[in-house]
């Protein structure tokens, strides 16, 4: 039995009726879920869908386009054609500078560097581009904010280097810089610098004539959007069509570069390390790569009208800094996950699938990351798994700031009670447990039928309960025991 059979079995076990994995995923949000897994350097893939498709089906990469742009940029830096601390005004055509500057921000614009752009600390505005169903403008018109652009003028709105402020506008400026430096259009330069060297043969910025194997956008797992997709002239920020397999080829190239694997270096080791060095608020250079706990680099994506996706690769980002070294954790070595959906409701879908994959693989889960990681999204139930008997040590009354909750037993099964008459059965969660030094692993339990989970663990040597609630906004609460 292969891994994807086990994964589909876990997914279909969530259904209250006799549904397939594809039908269950459509019910919770997306008609197609394309998955690739990088396991010790080897990539396997599967597309689970109610509308057709396979591992070669194209999806919009959304904001995962940004780290692909970042990789092209780092290749140019490695070749000596760019410097991270070069001022963008020294690289942009004068006509573009005149679009970007205002009387109040002219001096600030002169301070912005390539590093600022890539770490989203430039102070530039426009976080998201919705794309166009027809008559897409060119990039300079997008920057100007004039018709037919559907976003405001791209300009400086904050102090360069002061704070993280996610900016697709900044990446669109970088797109123009890369074209100016190389003398090539953006799709051609990325193809030469990244896609071709890594064998990313199913990655394009414009769909090829006659391309049939393309997913189309949906609002939910059942309802198609009014148009099949939007076109994005902001290619560097959000315009790539690709597959999970191709994106994991990029992840694998970064991992190999970090190790300095002879003959496999896409980037020199020091260049790769600099790309994944956190600058501010978990953001490195186009990758989200938190130095704590320093075990992975990630990016998520969301495009209008209906695309959600996520990619991650495990990596030792703390080697030599006194922290735990990932190289000692062989179960995660050269591993990663990419999940792509064609639905505006796909975030919950890919997050649950991500938790399930790491659970079945017994890989480490991810902590909270800025920018839409899986943390806080409630995992699937692990049906048929025996609950660690130590759960009973958490029996009793617990309180958050305002409300009291009770962990209690009903016929030897754990339940969580709220008030006198409201209770929910607790069932094992399909998410990797976390280790508490000197105490063992967490016991993770989903409130059956609800988007809530409790993590039974420890804090400062005392028993602790984390309550995850995937509401609006999502919440994580630490409950204190009532004496």
Image: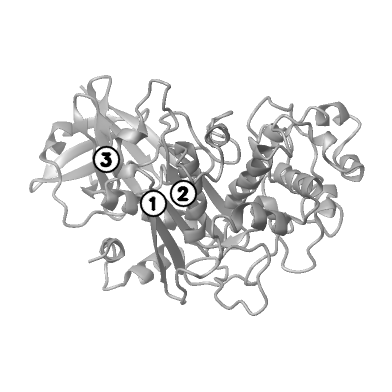
| Residues tagged 3 and 2 counted as in contact (Cβ below 8 A) | no
Secondary structure beneath dot 2 equals helix
Q: Is residue 421 above or below residue 113?
A: below
| Relative height, residue 55 to residue 424 (above, below) | below
Q: Horizontally, is 265 left or right of 292 in the view?
A: right
Q: Quadrant of residue 24?
A: bottom left
Instruction: Decide if residue 129 is in sight here.
Output: no
Q: Which of the 4 image quadrants contains residue 332?
A: top left
Left or right: 413 with respect to 203?
left
Identified at 70% across, 45% down, the residue is 171
Is residue 324 toward the left or the right of residue 72 in the image?
A: left
Q: Which residue is mark 2?
A: 252
Dot in front, 3 or 2: 2
Closest to the observer, 127 or 183 = 183
Q: What number of labels is visible?
A: 3
Q: Earlier in the sequence, mark 1 or mark 2?
A: 1
Question: Residue 300: horizontal and vertical position, in percent?
Answer: 53, 49
Query: Distance between the Cα atoms at labels 3 and 2?
Result: 26 Å
Q: How is the image coloured?
A: one colour
Q: Badges 1 and 2: C-beta atoms under 8 Å apart? A: yes
Q: Nearer the viewer, residue 194 or 455?
A: 194
Q: CA distance from mark 3 to mark 1?
A: 24 Å
Residue at left offset 19%, top offset 45%: 415
Q: Which mark is residue 433?
A: 3
Indicate the position of residue 477 as horizontal and vertical percent values.
37, 33
> Observer-nearest residue: 277 or 340?
277
Residue 41 image label? 1
Residue 308 is left or right of residue 397, and the answer is: right
């Amino acid at each position: 039995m292969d891994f994807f059979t086990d994964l589909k079995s876990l997914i279909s076990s969530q259904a209250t009726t006799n549904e397939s994995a594809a039908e269950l995923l459509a019910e919770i949000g997306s008609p197609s879920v394309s998955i690739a897994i990088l396991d010790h350097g080897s990539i396997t893939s599967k597309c689970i869908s109610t509308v057709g498709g396979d591992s070669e089906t194209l999806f919009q990469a959304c904001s995962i386009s940004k780290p692909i742009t970042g990789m092209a940029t780092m290749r140019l830096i490695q070749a000596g054609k760019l410097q991270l601390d070069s001022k963008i005004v020294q690289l942009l055509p004068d006509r573009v500078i005149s679009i970007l500057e205002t009387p109040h921000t002219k001096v600030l614009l002169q301070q912005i560097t390539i590093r600022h752009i890539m770490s989203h600390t430039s102070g530039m505005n426009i976080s998201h581009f919705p794309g166009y169903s027809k008559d897409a403008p060119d990039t300079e018109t997008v920057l100007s904010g004039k018709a037919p652009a559907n976003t405001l003028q791209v300009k400086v709105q904050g102090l360069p280097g002061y704070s993280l402020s996610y900016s697709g506008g900044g990446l669109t400026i970088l797109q123009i810089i890369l074209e100016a430096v190389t003398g090539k259009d953006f799709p051609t330069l990325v193809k030469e610098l990244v896609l071709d060297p890594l064998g990313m043969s199913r990655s394009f910025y414009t769909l090829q004539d006659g391309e049939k194997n393309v997913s189309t956008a949906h609002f939910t797992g059942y309802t198609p959007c009014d148009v099949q997709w939007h076109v994005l002239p902001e290619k560097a920020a959000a315009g790539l069509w690709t597959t999970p397999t191709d994106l994991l080829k990029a992840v694998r190239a970064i991992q190999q570069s970090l190790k300095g694997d002879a003959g496999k270096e896409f980037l020199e080791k020091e260049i790769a390390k600099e790309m994944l060095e956190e600058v501010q608020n978990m953001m490195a250079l186009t990758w989200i790569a938190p130095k704590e706990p320093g075990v992975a680099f990630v990016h998520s994506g969301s495009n209008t009208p209906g695309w959600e996706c996520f990619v991650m690769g495990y990596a030792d980002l703390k080697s030599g800094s006194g922290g735990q070294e990932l190289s000692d954790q062989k179960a995660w070595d050269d591993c990663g996950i990419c999940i792509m959906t064609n639905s505006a409701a796909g975030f919950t879908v890919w997050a649950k699938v991500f938790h399930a994959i790491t659970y079945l693989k017994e890989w480490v889960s991810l902590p909270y990351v800025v920018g839409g990681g899986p943390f806080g999204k409630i995992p699937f139930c692990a049906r048929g798994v025996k609950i660690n008997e130590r759960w009973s040590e958490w029996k009793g009354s617990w309180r958050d700031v305002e409300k009291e909750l009770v962990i209690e037993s009903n016929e030897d099964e754990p339940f969580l009670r709220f008030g006198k008459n409201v209770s929910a059965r607790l069932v094992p969660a399909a998410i990797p447990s976390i280790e508490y030094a000197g105490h063992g692993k967490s016991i993770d339990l989903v409130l059956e039928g609800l988007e809530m989970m409790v993590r039974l663990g420890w804090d400062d040597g005392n028993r602790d309960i984390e309550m995850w609630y995937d509401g609006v906004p999502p919440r994580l609460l630490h409950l204190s025991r009532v004496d």
